[in-house]
Structures are given as structure tokens and as C-alpha cells.
Image (cartoon, rainbow, N blue to C red):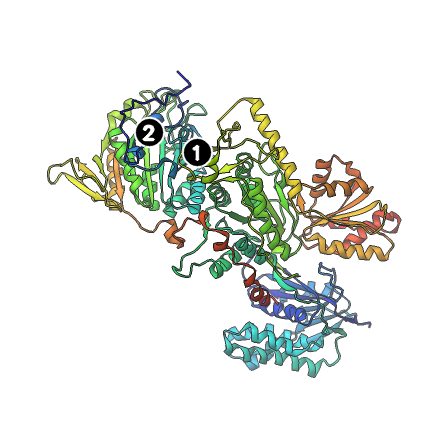
Amino acid sequence: MNKIKAINDFVILFANINGSGSASANNLFAKAVFRLGIPVSAKNIFPSNIQGLPTWFEVRVSEKGYLGRREGYDFVVATNGQTIVKDYNELATGGYFFYDSSRRLPDHLQRDDITIIGIPLTNICNENYTDPRLRQIFKNIIYVGALAYLFEMDFSVFEDSIKSQFAKKAKLIEPNINALRLGYDYAQKYFTDACALNIHRRDLNGDKIMIEGNTATGLGAVFAGVTVAGWYPITPSTSVIESFEKYCRQYRVDEATGKNKFAIVQAEDELAAIGIVIGAAWNGARSFTATSGPGVSLMGEFLGLAYFAEIPVFLVDIQRSGPSTGMPTRTQQSDVLAAAYASHGDTKHVLLFPATPKECFDMTVIGMDLAERLQTPVMLMSDLDLGMNTHLCEKIEFDDHHIYDRGKVLDYEALEAKQERWGRYLDVDDDGIPYRTIPGAHPEKGAFFTRGSSHDEYAAYTEDGKIYAKGMQRLLKKFDTAKTLVPEAEIHKVKDNNKLGIIYYGTSTYAGHEADDLLQEQGIHLDEMRIKAFPFGKEVEEFMQSHETIFVIEQNRDAQMKTLLVNEFQLDPKDLIPVLNIDGMPITAQYIADEINNHINPSQGKSKKFEVIS
Amino acid sequence: MSYIKSTFRHPSAKVNSLGFAKTAYEGALSTLCAGCGHDSISAAIIQSFFEMNIEPHKIAKISGIGCSSKTPTYFLGKAHGFNSVHGRMPSVSTGANMANKDLQYIGISGDGDTASIGMGQFAHVVRRNLNMIYIVMNNGCYGLTKGQDSATADIGSAGKKGVENQFAAIDLCQLALQLGAGYVARSFSGDKKQLIPLIKGAIEHKGFAFIDVISPCVTFNNVPTSTKGYEYVRDHLDATGTIDFVPERQELKIIHPEGTSKEVKLHDGSKLILKKNTHDYDLSSKREAMGIIETVREQKKILTGLIYLHEDPQDTHKKINSVDKPLNSLSQGEVCPGNAVLDALNEGFR
């Protein structure tokens, strides 16, 4: 049998039961890889459930720095009897099957192409602990200890991790290290040299960090000066607000009075959540909400109001698999169209597409500025993969010279100085953006009636079709202005006059980059463009015009970004080749490379896309 | 009807203590039907804020959709207004209030806007004890879509089309009581003498103040068969008592005979003087207030006046412990932690 041999380049699958404490043990393992200086990505594949159902945790160790999901498991840690057969069968040829040998493996599991590593986790626990709760928790820690030996990992990293994790609960340090040691020693005694997968120290992570996108987004909202949050709990967005609250409690409590410089209102539903955001923004506070697809649907009517009445809204959409309730704990990029054109009537909204937690932070700061500058809804299109998984990324920084752009607001002094008549919806600067006032600003000037019904330049109700149409056209002009303000697409041209291009955005970026490398090895050279925002800037248009065949990588069924591009630039849809993944798992580089290869060299093989769809 | 509203007033017209004439509290000309009860409520709002000496620009008026929700255009022209989305005035008001606790918030809604499409938002804004005045202009029908029954129409009541309503009516005052509103009143658009002191009391009340105002729809629901028409309402009113509002500064001028009147002190020292008629009960008892509404309903009458008053000092801001300064006035320096804190934070993610 050929065992898989690899150093710092393989995938481990942890198969657990949710609610059993496995998550912290698995994170301990992933963090150890990170601390050993090797790029690592961890993906939690969890059920919509609190306790008792299967949950998986994939860890990809990649010295080359590939952070996207990779298909196939080289090593499986099987602790869940419910899924053991599936986990066993899915292990790659030459791989390693690690299981709790306190119970025998089912007789029909008879693969001879894999290495079995049976460690009696339950028995070890029963021998060492009497408290049932400790038996459960330390079972997880023991397998981490065993892995440390099997992968030849520097044990001191784990000790240090435990010490820092329990810095405030010192009495837990020793028992945890002991549990690690139990696993390590057992593996050393019975499985010497069983495993040819190794994790050896490198120094590739610099000052990078590992953080969840939602944590970074919530932190970004604190730094962006958000003071009002209206929200309704929905997976996978809830942790955005939790993070916002956590950091508000850390940085926004007035020292003298103990009072909060923030207001977080848990609303009765998403309609109220966005209503709260709109009310607060109208009244001059920076406000935001976080939700997911179903919430965006519910917020539709209000988003149209914010668009038409021109109220700054910052909305974080952590996309999950739709439609309807869909797969609420699986990822997708399937709200692109729903968000871009949310609400009835003619509407268009500004979208931002972060690819890393660092960008979640940065784009929340930028997004809040854009919302106020443009007086319109701005949506941060994150997703479950980015939001709820820990990602390796650049450290978070805030430029202290960055002054919030509060947009065109006339305060008391400006109103006082104003000679000519002010019109709330008057385009005085020829950029489509009018000046607004905040309630209570001035005793005599600047009051107006905000409404979602048609209004003239002075905010008065009108049913004059020409005046209405003029206002709608001005909103388009404002959208043109937005094109010059949103983050530019990242473009990387690999050779001159290249007619082949690839487009990706958000969490398809990781796999997209890696796919480019795979394709390069096969002689296929693609110019790359990563879209960071909608509306699309000039650079996006130029890229579209200068390439004949462009692959658009997305994690939805209907090629939503492609539709948006075709629609906005009046392109021939045939020039854009969608590469789509909709199984709720993060898209992989191999899949993208295969799809593109098959398209360019159709004789070589059948597209896998159809297998996915069937 | 003239479409230009004259702003001319006699030079000797009364001004309030801020030096404002009543015109400063007026709005644009109403486009509602002639005789609409809502216009009387707008007039009462104007009168109340004028007499209460509130700076007009320190008021925010927020509404949903419907005939009632149009009215904020017709009063307080110097105040910012927000005609939002059908049934969603409570959430917009909540957000606005969170942003700036220092303005006076008046929410205008209708029976369709509150008792049907906005039922959820109404319930929750009451629960939050948001510091605002919430007025429902209640005519038992959908005026703007030509007279369909609303959820406050009584069983057996028939509007212009002559079809009797078969569905149970929602009593918004009872609902507000049940959900914890601290100030609950009902009035009639035709009873300015009662409505104005009720609005003044609501202005002074710290927390959620609810006033359900029966306001007949002259076009679609003002027929003898309707229980929300002028005729029926006038014939069936049963007030909890007469009511006067006495500001803190003002000395009591109206002296009621001993035993028949009751003072209710508001948080700032001003008082509501209630002269009781047959209904003498503890205004701060939710149970008794609920009971009296039921009792009067059984008598086929409409209870008006101040029904319940129990100030809960824990308004939304208190509940969430926000700073005294309005959140919308905090500077970047006050809300942005700055890059310095990020070193330690990043270290925690390594």
C-alpha cells in the first residue's frame, strides 16, 4: 500500500457530533498549525442544530499558501458513530483513518488501501477521569495530542496555546496539557512511524492573524463609528452583531458614567431591524444591520424607501444557501442579484465583495463612508464561509488619519449661511448627490418631509411624471458617481493581448487564485480580475471589452454576477462562461481548473458540473 | 378650496413663552376630505405643542402609510417629518429615537397601519417603552383605498357599502395596556377639550404614550350604521372624566370640588387634573383599567379620556444604558477606538 506522504500539504477531516466540545479542540489544532508558521484554512461544516447531529471540521495545511477548500481527505479523525461509514468511505486512497478504538469498527469496513489508526479515546478517558463532562471534553483534547505526535508537530506549540487560552483560568492548564500528553504518548507507543503526513515548522505567516469574517466585520463597525444597530438573529449573520457588541463593550463604554456609546436593538423581525437602521440614519447616526438572504428579502420594501428617499444604510449580508430556508448552515453567493436590485420599482444598490476578514473590516469602514456619501443603501456581501470560518489574513489596521466621510450634510452653520433656497433633492454639484439635513439642526431652515412617495427637488409630494422621472434619472447619475467611489477591481494580467480572462469575487477568490496556478501548469494563462464592488467601475468594463472569453467563478446556480455584468455592460452572454458551484461547500480550485480546462479542451473529459447538478 | 394657505396672522396674536405664534406650529394645507376627523386631530396637535412651548424644530414626526399618515405634512412645518412604510412607523421611530434622545417624537398611524399591517411593530415599540407619543387616528376603515373594513371595526358595524363587519374588533388601548404602555388614552377627534390635555399629558409623559383617537371617515364610514361615524360616536361617548393639563409653572386655577377631582403628577411636576364622573378607579391599576374598558364596552359605549397612567422610568435608552449625550452627536474621537488598540487585538488572533 502506498501511504500518502506529505509535509505541510494535506487535508484533515474531523468528524464530530455537535455540542460535544469538539470545536474548541479542532480550533486548537488549526491554531497550532498556524503558530508553526504554516498557512492553514479551517472550515466548519455544521448542521442547523444545537446538539447531537453530525458536524465536520476540515483543516487544510498548505505551505504554498492556498487557503481555499481542497477536495478529498488525506486524514480522517472519526469520532462520530453516526457518520463513521461515510467518513471511512470518503477517505482518499493511501490515507489515514483515525478512530476511537474503544469500540470496534463495523465489520464491513474492510478497505485495504488505507492506514487504520485506532486509539481507544473513550477507554483512556474512563481510566483517567471520573467526571462524565471531563471525559467528554478531554476525549477531544486527547485526539489532538495524538495528532501532534502523528504529524511530528512541535508539542510546545500546543502547551503554549493551552497556556494562553486558559491564562485567566490557570487551574485548567495542567489538566489540558495532561490530556494532550495522554494522546501523544499513546500514539507514540502504538503508532510509531504509522503516519507519513507531517507538519513541520516554517515561518510563512509573518504578522498575519486568524480571524472569522464576522468578528472582523463587527469590529469594523465599531471603528466605522456605528452607534446604532438594529438586527434580528439569523444564521450565519448573528455573530456580526455579537462581535459588534463585544467590542462596543470593550471600547465604547464611557469610563466616567459606565454608560454605552452605542445602541443595539434586537428587533422583532428583519423589517423592523432595517426600519431602525433607516430611522437612525435619517436622524444622523451611523447605523447598520447584519442579516442573511431571508432577511434581505424581508427588508426589500424598506431598501426601496432608503434608495428613493436617499437615506444611508449599511447592511451586512452573510449569504447562505437559498432559496427559502435552503441550507441555512451552508455557504453560497446567491444573493447577488437580490441585493443589487432589491425592492420593487427601479432600484440599484451599491454592493461590496470582501474576500478576507481583513477586507470585511476595511469594507465596513469604507462602506459606512460610502453609504453616507451616496445617501443610499450599501451592502457588504459576505458569506457563511467567510463570516463563520476562521481565515488566515493580514492583520487588522486602521488609519488614524482617516476622517469619516459624513457626506453632504448641512449643519446649523451651513444652513445659517445659506442664501439661496435649499432643496433636499436638488443636484447642485452635478454628481447626483443632494444635500441633506438632520432633524433638529436649525430652528427655521432645513426641515423637510422625507417620503417614499414621489417628490420634487424640494421634497414636496408630486404626481408630475416629468418631475418624478427627472428624480429617477438623477438617481442613475448618482449611481454613476458611485462607480468612481467604490473599491476598484483587482486586475492581474499575465500576458499581453490575452483573450482569456477569469473573474471571481468574495470567497471564490481563494480557489480562483489557486485554479489559475493549476491552469498555468497546464499552459492555460488567464488574466484575472477580482470584482470588489458593484456598480462596476471603468476598469471592469475595460477588462470585459478586452477579453473574448471570460470565465466567471461563482457559488450560485444561476450565474448571478455574470447576469449583472451582462446586464450592466450589454455584453453577449455567450462570451461569459460560468463556472458554478452550488453544493453549499466552498468552491475548490480543482473543480474550477477542471471546468475551465474542459471548456478550452472539450475532448479531454466531461464537465463535472453536470454531476454536481444531477 | 384654496391651495395657498395664508400665513398672515393679526400682529397682536398670542405668542407662547418661546415667542412663537401658533403659525410656527402649523403645516401645509390639508388635502384630506372636508370634515375629516384627522384634520381636527392635527389642529389639536398644533395647539398642544404651541401651548406646551416646545421648539418646533425639536420635534420629529413620523408616520406610516394611509390617510392618517399623511397628516404630519399638515402640522409642525418646521419639524422634520418622515412618511415611511406601511405599518413600519414604530421601527423608524425607534431608530430615530436611538440616534437622538433629545427630540420629541410623535408617531402618527391609522387603524390599518397599526392594527393590521403594523401590529407586530406596534406591539414591540410598546414593549420597548420608547419615549414617544403614538397617536392612532382610528376611523375603522381604510380610507385611502376607499373604505374597506379595518381591524378596529366593530362586529356588526357597516360603512357606506352597507355590509356588516363579521370580525372581532381589536381594541388598541387594551392591547397597549397589556403590552406595558405607561400612558394609555382614548379620545374623539370632535372633542378638542379632551384631546388637547391628553396630548399635552402625552408630551410630558416620559416613555411610551398611546392615544387612540376615534376619527370618523366622512367619506366612507360616516353613516348611521357605522360605530365609527360622528353620530354614533357622539351618542355613545363615555368619558372617564374631564381632564385638564396644568404645566409645572402654572398655578392651579381650576378647582374642582373636593372628592370629585384627582391630580396626577407627571415626571416634571406638571399635573393632569381629572374630574371623575361615574368611573372612579385607580388610574395606575392595569387590571382596573382593563376592567373599565370591558365594562363600558358591555354597555355599548366608548370609553374616552385618560385610561391608564403609570410612569415607568425605564425607557428604551435607560434599558440599554446609553449615554446621556445623543448618539448622533458623538464625534469620531468619541466612537473610534483608533489604531493603537489593534496591536493587542491582533495579537489575540495569533
Q: How many marks?
A: 2
- The structure residue drawn at horizontal position 69% and vertical position 47%, both measured from the top left corner, is A488
Q: Secondary structure at mark 2?
A: helix
User: Which residue corresponds to mark 1?
Assistant: A445
Q: Is residue A253 left or right of residue A88?
A: left
| Residue reaching furthest to the right | A603
Q: Looking at numbered disc 2 in the image, what kind of residue is underneath it? A: Ile
Left or right, residue A371 beside residue A544? left
Q: Secondary structure at mark 1?
A: loop
Disc number lying in front (1 or 2): 1
Tell me the amino acid under the disc marked 1: Lys
Q: Is residue B155 visible?
A: no
Task: Tell me the crowding category of disc 1: few under 14, some 14 to 19, or many 20 or more residues within 10 angstroms, Cα based.
Answer: some
Q: CA distance from mark 1 to mark 2?
A: 26 Å
Identify the image quadrant of residue A16. bottom right
Q: Where is residue A11 shown, x and y percent of the image?
A: 72, 65
Label disc, if present, on residue B257 of the rendered structure: none
Identity of the residue drawn at 77% across and 74% down: A196
Residue B241 higher or lower than A134, as above or below: above
Task: Please tell me the numbered disc located at residue B41.
Answer: 2
Residue sitting at x 82%, y 52% = A494
Extreme residue in the left direction:
B258
Residue B91 point in image, percent of width and height? 45, 42
State the residue in front, A34 or B305.
A34
**Quadrant where the N terminus of chain A lies?**
bottom right
Front-most of A431 and B111? A431
Mark 1 and mark 2 residues within 8 Å of each other at the beta carbon: no
Q: Would residue A92 be visible to someone looking at this image?
A: yes
Chain letter for mark 2: B
Picture quarter containing residue A54?
bottom right
Q: Position of residue B189 (x, y in %)?
A: 30, 28
